[in-house]
Amino acid sequence: MTNEPPYSTTTLDSDDEEAIRGIVRDVEEGFNRNEPELLGVHLAQDAVVGNALGVWSEGRAAIDEANRVGLAGFLRDATAHYEVSGVAALAPDVAVAQKRAWSTHTAADAGEEPEMIALYVFVRRDGRWWIARRQNTLVAPRA
């Protein structure tokens, strides 16, 4: 027995990686269109989300309600551009994705630091990928 942590030996095929990237694109599109249904369509029923303001929502119904309130209120005029910076399998039917986010395509294209980062945990259930967990974190501006 060793105390060295093992590397994951599980891999994602290209179809699975593209499905996960497509889910993140749907989240971006739902946010930019102010469509809470599209924003939450890929959430597992038992999903948990920590948003960029530190609000913790458990269960799809609670997350959907938070999305509806946010998109109708303080996020109504907000936009976002997402870039998936990594996707990896952790175990069979479990994957993670890292996302960087800016409020505009222009900021991302100009090479500005992301304004937010996020970590998604995906699970495969009934033959498709679902968001099981998501944690959004605001990035502090560099001094």
Image (tube, rainbow, N blue to C red):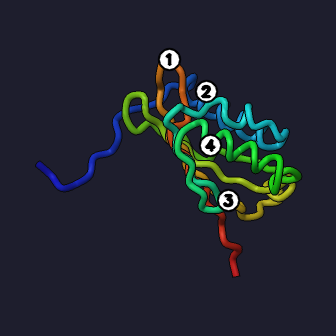
Q: Earlier in the sequence, mark 2 or mark 1?
A: 2
**Label 1 belongs to which residue?**
127
| Dot 1 amino acid type | Gly
Q: Which-is-in-front pick, marks 2 and 4?
A: 4
Q: Nearer the viewer, residue 101 or 75?
A: 75
| Dot 3 amino acid type | Met
**CA–CA distance in space, label 2 to label 1:** 11 Å
Q: Nearer the viewer, residue 44 or 93?
A: 44
- Secondary element at tag 2: helix
User: Do the residues bearing badges 2 and 3 touch, measured as CB atoms within 8 Å?
Assistant: no
**Label 2 belongs to which residue?**
19
**CA–CA distance in space, label 4 to label 1:** 23 Å
| Dot 4 amino acid type | Ile
Taking 57 as reference, is 55 above or below it?
below
Res. 63 mark = 4
- Say which residue appears at 65% left-offset and 66% top-offset: 139
**Label 3 belongs to which residue?**
116
Q: Residues within 10 Å of mark 4 (few under 14, many from 20)?
A: many
Can you see residue 108?
A: yes
Q: Earlier in the sequence, mark 2 or mark 4?
A: 2
- Say which residue appears at 70% left-offset and 38% top-offset: 27
**CA–CA distance in space, label 3 to label 1:** 30 Å
